[in-house]
Amino acid sequence: MNAGSRVWKSGLAAGWLAIVGTMASRASDLNSDGGLGNQTDGVLLVSPWSRNLVYGSTGSQSPFTNVFANNGMGVYWATTASGAWFSQNVGPISTSTTSHVYANLDVMLPSTGGFRPLLCQASGVNPSVLLHVKDTGIFAYSLTNQPGAAICAVETGEWYNIQLTLDLKANTYSGAVIKAGNSLRCPISTRPLTYADKSITLIGADHAGLNNGGCRVDNWLLSDTPLPAPPSVGHLTRYVAQAGQTPGGGYLTWATAASNIQDAVDAAAAGEVVLVSNGVYNTGGVKTPSYLVTNRLVVDKAVAVRSVNGPEATIIEGVVDPSDPVDGLGANAVRCVYLRNGASLAGFTLTNGRTLKTGGHYQFDRAGGGAVIHAGCVVSNCVLTGNKASDYGGGAYLPQNSAGTLVDCTVRNNATTQWSGGVQNEGGTIRDCVIDGNYGDMYCGGVIMAFGATLSHCVVSNNSSRYGPGGVYLVSGGTIDNCLVANNAVNVSHATANRPCGIWLDASTAPQIVDNCTIANNRGKKNGGGVGFTGGSSNAMRNCIVWGNTDADDTYSNVYVSAASATVIDYTCSGPAQTAYGAGNIGGDPRFADAGAENFHLKVSSPCINHGLNTSWMTNAVDLDGTARIKRDVVDMGCYETDFPVGTAIVVR
């Protein structure tokens, strides 16, 4: 290859791109090898490419796939000579021509120390270095402003692939460092580009003292065209242990773990895991983004925070405001966790979380004492207990129009001074949870379901409220299926407590459905000890058992339907039978196994067995126990399917 053949893509070359040496322009250059003479991967760099290039002996080539396949860049450079450098310069760049530049290189670090720039903001003397290798780490920032710890710890004698995206209009860059063998992925979070003339140098620069001795480079490229995706790798893990360090480092091993969960989350990028060891994490705090209340932990990116040994051993603790001796709410309160932008949390106990008492935003400053779970976020295998909010969701709050998820959790002994002592769910999903012993000082002790929310395969028990309901309040559309709602209570001594107790379906023009649930032993004051329908044109209950509930002030102990409600009730067992509202309803004793001991499975003599209505959702579905929803030809009423012991004789009359 001669000097005149070193060319670049015409879209970059037109008036703003210059590469060291003489160059021409062809539109097809990047479709082959960037005008480098069809170099083969692992072949030494052909002179003259850069000034003062000193060749060293050949060595092992990069194991990464060439970014442009067989006919790609494939340039290899290895030297042990002091003072040699290797550079590819672009500049100045017009942002009216392109908004992004993409960079790729594979690099192996030498066994000796020293400073090696990888990305510079300008060529010439003493350029501003944005990304560099020093000793056994990759650092960001400039020569004069190096951080205290590397963004990625690396090993000598190992190959690493670096892919970067430079946003020329936003003046930022980001990317990732990937170790050969896909065993490590270090993200490079958004970093500033602050130069004026948009000049870029990849690999080295023209200033005295540069020592790249022993550094090897392969498969390098600058382009205005997005590069192929880097190798897929497992999630990079950051570690947290109470005996760890705070702050500093990337927390990439247990030996260098953070002592604070927030520090590790801040260091992580989307797609990574933060792994937390045993302990009570009760220090530090971060304000809710754009709001006022402090949180023990804010995860505002798609980072998965996981405990090692589960909620019994790993606790995130909020703060009770001492200025409020009754509720602990106020400006000095600390909520446990705030999640958004695809974050997830698994395996923790969240306790003593509190919110503001007054002022602030009612959703994000005064709701969700234990956790706020935004769209796309998941809290799983957690215990939320002893938390309190002034408005909604003492245990947890899933905001309006949210697709947040609470799964496989226990929500117990939480409270609010207003609505939903356990959980406020506005459009999200609660699945496989126990919601028990929570209290709402106004409405709903257990869980409020709104805006199309889903409650599935849950136990809602022993919750209470002042006005009702004790268990579940369903409004503005939503579904409850395969749930047990039992032993909830309304304060019958309160003069205005007149809401249904177990489940209340309020006015709504959107569908509200209760499907295959057991509602039993709830204690109300008025308008339905078990289930109450007080309005709406789309309410429906089917395949349910509503039995053993009490109502202190009227005769609607199990089911109440107001005159304004166009409700359909099908294939439901209650006393009395709800024959006026649909088909297949019965009024006989369902014959629970042991209601006094809160065992609401059915005896084999129950009239509810094989007496439901099969629907399409039951295909491959399971009951509350996790066993097949239809064990014989017809579904059972209630939340449990019944297994007959081997040899049982069934008499059909």
Image (cartoon, grey):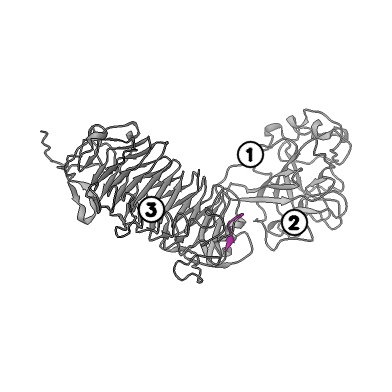
Q: Which amino acid, mark 1?
A: Ala
Residue beneath the point at 39% across and 45% down: 474
- Residue 382 percent coordinates (x, y): 43, 56
Circle 2 packing at 10 Å, graded few (<14), some (14-19), many (20+), is some
- Whether tag 2 and tag 1 are in contact, CB under 8 A, the answer is no
Q: Is residue 209 left or right of residue 254?
A: right
Q: CA distance from mark 3 to mark 1?
A: 50 Å
User: Which tag, 2 or 1, sits closer to the chain's start?
Assistant: 2
- Residue 2 percent coordinates (x, y): 86, 34
Circle 1 packing at 10 Å, graded few (<14), some (14-19), many (20+), is few
Residue under numbered circle 2: 141
Q: CA distance from mark 3 to mark 2?
A: 53 Å
- Residue 124 percent coordinates (x, y): 87, 50
Range drawn in magenta = 285-290
- Whether tag 3 and tag 2 are in contact, CB under 8 A, the answer is no
**From the image, which quarter does the N terminus lie in?**
top right
Disc 1 element? loop
Location of residue 29 with respect to 475 vertically, above or below: above
Q: Is residue 246 left or right of residue 490?
A: right
Residue under numbered circle 1: 229
User: Which tag, 3 or 1, sits closer to the chain's start?
Assistant: 1
Give the image quarter of residue 611. top left
- Front disc: 2 or 1: 2
Residue under numbered circle 3: 444
Q: Which amino acid, mark 3?
A: Cys
